[in-house]
Image (cartoon, rainbow, N blue to C red):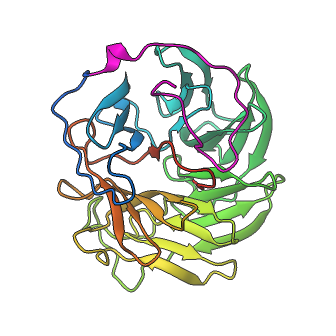
Amino acid sequence: MNDLTPQNISSKPVPELHRRSFALAAFAGILTGQVSKLSHAADAAKPRRILAADKNVVAIVDDSGKVHWHFENGAEAHDLHLLPNGNVLLPVSRTKVVEVTPDKKIAWSYDAKPKAGYDGRVEVHAFQQLADGRVMVAESGNRRIVEVDREGKIAFEMPLTVDNPHPHRDTRMVRRMSHGGYLVCHEADATVREYDRSGKVLWSYTLDLGGRPRSDGHGPEGHGVEVYGAVRLENGNTLIGGGNNNRVLEVNPAGKVVWSIDQKELPGITLAWVTTVTRLPNGNTIVGNCHAGKGQPQLFEVTPDKKVVWSFENFETFGNGLAASQVLDLPVGAIR
């Protein structure tokens, strides 16, 4: 099995479209001298691979520092996916999403345009390949979700509820739900909304400041309610990466917080812009920690009783703006 082939990357993996054979020898040692801080109590002998984007590159690295693949790319990335066929779904501009093969060829693309009746800016911050081969694209500015087919045509469109419209802040992370609707993080609204396929809001949760005053900044000093990530768990709760809320929250359907990590609750870790969140079958949670600065993990795994069992820090390949990431080779049942 090659280094770009995902293993059990989702509890409900999409059907495999096709596999491409390729050699990775050319990528070995592309970037050297990298240092990753590693604390992996479960299996320290097996490096964990991470797909992430920052510093003008999308790369697959492991937590020993080895680079397995890289793709030069200057676009800001708020979402990334390694697909079952070995390709990578990534943004190459604020409007364009592409599927890149391991040998860096473009296999598919979609460029979002202003919808009819709207002449403002459009940005894409979330996308996801679906089980039927379509790709979901969330279009900020257009305030809609579209599903795009393999020919690049819009096959489905769903409106979004946005109280504070802004082409850069309408949406962040978006994920398809089992009923066919979507769980959408609305950054400017400080709200996570669950939609059915008609665009009806079925559930919502609005973040608060958690007892701290609002403050400016992208680093640990900044505090607000600009939410980034959320996934629906099997127990019906919603796991939320709070963005500049500097917190991880698990809330039940009634909107009650049943588990959380506050900014400085974990010894030696300070939460800054909390981005991606993943719940593992053993109950552990993987957290993306962007803008926290050197000396802080960009990703870490924590148990339900808040013991950190793994952390990742690599400021050679990536930098302080690592927002989009996907820890690969996770067990069946991981939700992200």
Would residue 79 appear left or right of 205 to someone viewing this image? Answer: left
150 to 201, vertically: above or below: above
- Relative to 230, say whether 143 is above or below: above
Q: Nearer the viewer, residue 3 or 111?
A: 3
Q: Measured from the top left, where is residue 295 in percent x and y?
A: 17, 57
Residue at far right of view: 198
Residue occupying the point 31% across, 44% down: 63
Image vertical order of residue 73 relative to residue 129, above or below: above
* x and y, in percent, of residue 140 in the image: 58, 45
Q: Which residue shows up at 73% across the image and 55% down it?
A: 177
Would you place residue 30 above or below residue 174 in this image? above
From the viewer's side, name the closer residue of 318 and 11. 11
Question: Is 10 covered by the magenta stretch?
Answer: yes
Write the residue at 33% across / 13% down.
Answer: 26
Visible residue check, residue 116: no
Residue at x-position 80% and y-position 51%? 180
Q: Is residue 77 left or right of residue 137?
A: left
Between residue 85 and residue 169, name the one nearer to us: 85
Q: Which residues are magenta?
A: 1-28
Q: Main secondary structure of the magenta part?
A: loop
Q: Is residue 45 found inside the magenta-colored segment of the image? A: no
Q: Is residue 158 visible?
A: yes
- Percent position (x, y) of residue 196? 80, 57
